[in-house]
Image: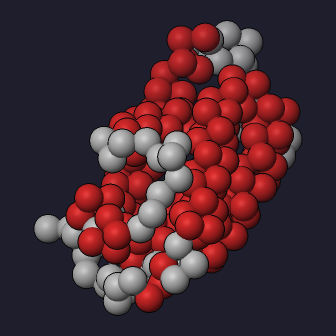
Amino acid sequence: MFVGGIASKGQLRMSFLRWAVVTVPLIVLLGFLSGRSVPVGSESAWYQALAKPALTPPGWAFPVAWTTLYILIGLALAMILNARGAAMRGTAIALFVAQFALNLAWTPVFFGLHKIGLSVMIIVAMLALSIAATIVFARIRKAAAWLMVPYMVWISFAGMLAYGIGALNPDAETLAAPSHTSQML
């Protein structure tokens, strides 16, 4: 019930939850589909043949990290979508969508096309856009900005890993033919 034209805390919470019920599963699903679009990790003979930096986490860590991060950024996006009438809300959403589109493109470029240099450039652009989105998020909802921080740390780490793989494997593109087969069933 509206009191004096202002929504109650309960109404605001329910509105946020409605957004989160859409954004979190959608972002997790899109991330999953990107990851299944080409062979990745232990399913990729090309990736297995690469020399990797010493700090490369075990294979099981990647799906755990990405699922957690996708949940966090899905919640952040839900907070921004729920902030109807907030100045710069449209800009925040556009920046988020742009960086997330790059996120979804990264796996097919790195694991499918074996383009390490391009994948590093994608991560740099993704990081720049996610920083910009986070700055705008902070002006709308500080909690949404804080939810983006682990994501930016992880993509920075992923960028360093990709760069390290490129440095250790200057002939990476020629190790195997690009993979265009989907892993989705």
Q: Is residue 85 left or right of residue 63?
A: right
Colour theme: secondary structure
Residue 89's image quarter? Answer: top right
Q: Is residue 182 left or right of residue 94?
A: left
**Residue 169 vs residue 10, the one in the foreground:** 169
- Pick whichever, 62 or 29, lies toward us: 62
**Taking 67 as reference, is 54 left or right?**
right
Return the x and y of residue 141 as percentages of the image width and height.
74, 28
Task: Say which of 3 and 112 sits in front.
Answer: 112
Residue at screen point 63% across, 62% down: 163
Q: Which percent across, then down, holds residue 5?
A: 72, 19
**Which residue of the protein is positioned furthest toward the left in this rendering?**
185
- At 61% from the left and 46% from the top, the residue drawn is 157
Q: In this image, 136 relative to 98: left or right? A: right
The answer to whether residue 11 shows anywhere in this view is yes
In the rendered view, would you say 160 is above or below 23? below
Q: In the rendering, at what x and y percent does residue 100 appear?
A: 58, 57
Q: Is residue 132 above or below residue 15?
A: below
Quadrant of the snapshot with the N terminus: top right
Q: Considering depth in this image, is 30 or 122 the residue closer to the camera? A: 122
Query: In what quadrant of the picture does the C terminus appear?
Result: bottom left
Residue 107 found in image quarter: bottom left
Task: Name the image quarter holding residue 18.
Answer: top left
Q: Is residue 25 visible?
A: no
- Residue drawn at x 59%, y 42% is 154
Q: How many marks?
A: 0
- Residue that appears at 60% across and 60% down: 164
